[in-house]
């Protein structure tokens, strides 16, 4: 379990999304976090790959 203290504007956005989609605020927050986490992980994997290629190019 995770408890977050979110800024009021983010809570309002989640509530609005919840009302629009008919899902719970918890469900919406979970989906947003999971999607963002995947994006961040992909970004770091890509950056790591670029750095590794750069380092291998320098060693040639």
Image (cartoon, grey):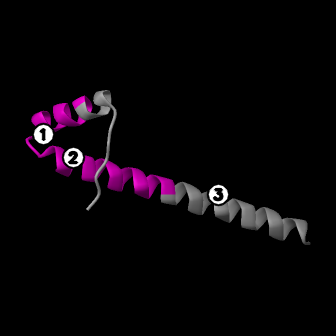
Residue 35 is labelled as none
Q: Which residue is mark 1?
A: 21
Which span of residues is magenta-colored?
A: 12-40
Quadrant position of residue 23: top left
Residue 47 is labelled as 3
Q: Residue furthest left?
A: 22
- Magenta residue check for 50: no
Q: Secondary structure at mark 3?
A: helix
Quadrant including the N terminus: bottom left
The answer to whether residue 39 is left or right of residue 44 is left
Q: Secondary structure at mark 2?
A: helix
Quadrant position of residue 12: top left
Which residue is at a point 64% across and 57% down the rendered structure image?
Answer: 47
How far, Cα to Cα, is label 3 from label 2?
29 Å
Depth order, front residue of 18/43: 18
Quadrant including the C terminus: bottom right
Q: Which residue is mark 2?
A: 28
How far, Cα to Cα, is label 1 from label 2?
9 Å
């Amino acid at each position: 379990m995770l408890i977050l203290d979110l800024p009021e504007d983010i809570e309002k956005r989640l509530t609005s999304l919840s009302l629009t989609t008919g899902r719970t605020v918890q469900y919406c927050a979970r989906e947003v976090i999971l999607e963002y986490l995947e994006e961040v992980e992909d970004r770091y994997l890509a950056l790591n790959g670029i750095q590794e290629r750069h380092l291998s190019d320098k060693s040639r």
